[in-house]
């Protein structure tokens, strides 16, 4: 889901809009861009060595904005080499947007795209039925592990698909972010969605350690401007509340005492910093690079 929504609302259009507001009020994509510019070239430096084709698997590729940034870095590293880019994405709406983005982007001549409308576990089940597993040179899972029921099994499976010199990039919220604190304190009081689980990089690194999988780890600061959440009746604030709490129409349906409590916490320094009159929630991201 390249930076996908962390929960499913019953009202799909509101859920898409709350996610859109999150992106426009946060530095999420800028943070990812910084990583792609500064760190990714070194990470992919050897993935295509002695290979006539580079195979990339995008799990939860969303609308493709981050995927295309990754592909441009691979092209720069291996000019002229043929690239196969397969995308696993359960949302038909996101796949349509991805295809539209590809259609209007130049310099993609040496890339062959394929999209699979399915979840990562559906893809995994489909692959397991095949006699021989396809190997990949680069696999990435960007902001999608929240939707996976059995994360260790998923990590183990996709790690087993890595070819020689291959890498797997996982991006999700940092254990040092305010998401961790918010979920820990209020998770049990918010309406849980069994399609989504609270997981941060702290949980993920423990899982990788248990599996004996080697990885490198980078944390980058990202913030979300939640100032509008404190203005009564503000539409942008209402949608950001939905995103923060993973609850549709939180502002109008939540018990007043719960909302008041979260509102006080969100303004505390352990959750947000106040800068130039804005309240900036800590949305820091972790970039975990797994080796074959």
Image: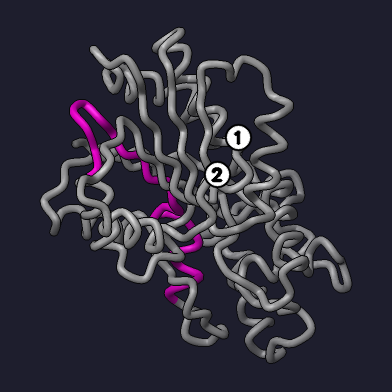
What mark, if any, has residue 61 been given in the picture? none
Residue occupying image coordinates x 21% and y 54%: 156
Q: Is residue 179 magenta?
A: yes
The residue sitting at 70% across, 87% down in the picture is 254
Q: Do the residues labelled 1 and 2 touch (CB within 8 Å)?
A: yes
Q: For mark 1, what is the residue?
A: 30
Q: Where does the magenta region start and end?
A: 161-184
- Residue 187 spot, x, y in % from top left: 48, 79
Residue 108, given in percent of the width and then of the height, sits at 58, 19
Mark 1 Cα-neighbour bin, 10 Å: few <14, some 14–19, many ≥20: few
* Helix, strand or loop at mark 1: helix
Of residues 199 and 52, the one nearer the viewer is 52
Task: State whether residue 254 appears in this view.
Answer: yes
**Image spot of residue 271 (x, y percent):** 54, 61
Instruction: Report whether 125 appears left or right of 100.
Output: left
Kind of element beneath mark 2: loop
Q: Return the residue at label 2.
A: 222
The answer to which of 231 and 213 lies nearer the viewer is: 213
Q: Label 1 to label 2, Cα distance in Å?
A: 8 Å
């Amino acid at each position: 889901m390249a930076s996908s929504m962390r929960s499913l609302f019953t009202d799909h259009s509101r859920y898409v809009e709350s996610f859109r507001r999150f992106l426009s009020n946060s530095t999420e994509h800028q943070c990812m861009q910084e990583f792609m510019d500064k760190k990714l070239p070194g990470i992919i430096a050897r993935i295509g060595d002695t290979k006539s084709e580079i195979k990339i698997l995008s799990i939860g590729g969303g609308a493709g904005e981050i995927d295309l940034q990754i592909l441009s870095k691979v092209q720069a590293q291996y000019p002229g080499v043929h690239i196969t880019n397969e995308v696993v994405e359960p949302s038909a709406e996101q796949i349509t947007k991805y295809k539209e983005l590809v259609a209007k982007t130049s310099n993609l001549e040496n890339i062959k795209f394929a999209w699979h409308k399915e979840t990562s576990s559906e893809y995994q089940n489909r692959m397991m039925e095949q006699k021989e597993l396809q190997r990949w040179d680069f696999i990435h899972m960007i902001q999608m592990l929240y939707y996976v029921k059995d994360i260790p099994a998923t990590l183990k499976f996709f790690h087993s698909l890595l070819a020689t010199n291959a890498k797997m990039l996982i991006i999700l919220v940092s254990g040092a972010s305010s998401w961790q604190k918010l979920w820990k304190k209020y998770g049990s009081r918010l309406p849980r969605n069994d399609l989504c689980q609270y997981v941060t990089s702290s949980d993920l690194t423990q899982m990788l350690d248990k599996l004996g999988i080697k990885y490198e780890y980078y944390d980058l600061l990202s913030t979300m401007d939640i100032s509008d959440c404190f203005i009564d009746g503000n539409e942008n604030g209402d949608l950001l509340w939905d995103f923060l709490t993973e609850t549709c129409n939180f502002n109008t349906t939540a018990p007043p005492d719960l909302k008041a409590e979260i509102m006080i916490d969100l303004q505390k320094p352990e959750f947000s910093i106040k800068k130039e009159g804005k309240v900036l929630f800590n949305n820091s991201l972790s970039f975990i690079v797994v080796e074959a």
